[in-house]
Amino acid sequence: MTHTLRLLLAVLGLAVLSLTAQAAVDPTDVLIKALIEKNVITEDDAAAVRAEIANTRQEEDAARKSYPVTGKRPLKVSGYLQTRYTSSDDDTLNSGFEVKRARLQLAGDATPVIDYKLQMDFAGAKKAVTAVNSDPTKSKTDLFGKPTLLDAVIGYKLSQNTRFQAGQFYIPFGLENITSDAVLDTINRSQTTERLVPGRDTGNQGRDIGIQFGGIRPLDSEGSRALEYAVALLNGAGINTGDDNGRADVAAHVLLKPGIDGLAVGGSYFNGATGTTRVPHERTGLELVYRYGGWAVKGEYLTGKDDVSKHGYYGTLVRNLSKFTQAVVRYDHVSSSAFKTTDTVKPSKVTTVGLNWFLSKDTQTRIAVNYELRREDGAQVANDQLLAQFQASF
């Protein structure tokens, strides 16, 4: 394009940003037609300008974080869909397609200081799978459950930086546990998280019912140093379930940003009991995240004690290859004692290699491909997996 045409395109772009989506006639198109008629630009130039404007509009739409829906009060509707294909070397598993998740979330403010969040998964939970410590990645159709209530939270803003909440929510424990499935670096969570994090190891999506107090405490005036914290008192029986033993579980999580760009370190503690016999259910965890340029390093080390002592850890390396592509490598190891003799699949070391293609600016509409190389401490089992997932967020 000529310099004049580029200048014209910039002027038209500013005009586009000022237009409303409801306009019946597009003033920009009227202007382009007038310039053609006056022989200022050619039809080819006009086509290029229209294409640039359409691309700008699409990017602006994608950049919007929310679209309020009006009811009695403004309401935010969001969610995402995940369709997955899994191919496994394990002959006992069916390779094929599945709707892994179909999440719908409603959130808003009931008053200036009271907010709420409600989230459902219409693809159904896999609770029956993980409750017996079986392989959480199984894809047989008989493992699908009914639509499940995941989150039902009422929050009270005590101050700008502190909040109290009650209902059903993520147990404040760990890094990967409280990260939404929509923004995970890999398709599956690590086996360390699935086997050792409270609420994950019992097949309850990392959630429970109770109350929580938390917030952020700035440690300097610039905001580069801060401490995030959360303490919760929970039933301990899982989602959509009342207390089963009369003993409250306690969970706590802290995350420190020490003032070094991109660095955050944290720790978690959980003390509870499961079942009517009150089997001890204790967990501790350490976590680290460091981002530098297009690189990110993430890791956790978890220990636990219930019927057996156990520990596990994982490390993830993420590299942004371009604005819309990302490579991921993760090594994940859980001690053999974390698996029971009744388990049919006992992966101990899992190396995951993956690629993410982002189809939107917020990265939450994406295509991901992962290969999981699984190795056991004892006799080897043919259970490597190839996964491909298409996610659309709204």
Image: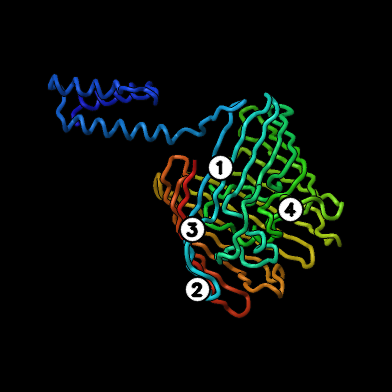
Q: Viewer-nearest of labels 1 and 3? A: 3
- Which of the labelled discs sits on residue 238, or is there none? 4
Indicate the position of residue 243 as horizontal and vertical percent values.
Answer: 81, 51
The mark nearer the N terminus, 4 or 2, is 2
Determine the secondary structure under disc 3. Answer: strand
Residue at image point 51% right, 31% down? 67
Considering only vertical position in the picture, is 349 above or below 274? Answer: below
Q: Nearer the viewer, residue 356 or 237?
A: 237
Considering only vertical position in the picture, is 96 above or below 288? Answer: below
Q: Which residue is mark 3?
A: 84
Q: Do tag 4 and tag 2 residues touch (Cβ < 8 Å)?
A: no
Considering only vertical position in the picture, is 245 above or below 94? Answer: above
The mark nearer the N terminus, 3 or 2, is 3
Q: Viewer-nearest of labels 3 and 2? A: 3
Task: Give the residue type at disc 2.
Answer: Asp
Task: Give the residue type at disc 3.
Answer: Arg
Whole-number angstrom distance, CA of label 2 to CA of label 1:
39 Å
Q: Nearer the viewer, residue 293 or 161?
A: 161
Q: Nearer the viewer, residue 37 or 213?
A: 37
Task: Give the residue type at disc 1.
Answer: Gly
Residue 56 relative to residue 283: left or right: left
Residue 242 visible in this rendered orientation of the protein: yes
The mark nearer the N terminus, 4 or 3, is 3
Determine the secondary structure under disc 1. Answer: loop
Q: Which residue is mark 2?
A: 89
Whole-number angstrom distance, CA of label 1 to CA of label 3:
32 Å
Indicate the position of residue 176 as horizontal and vertical percent values.
Answer: 62, 51
Q: Which residue is mark 1?
A: 262
Q: Nearer the viewer, residue 242 or 11?
A: 242
Dividing the image into 4 quarters, which one contains the N terminus? top left
Residue at image point 65% right, 66% down? 334
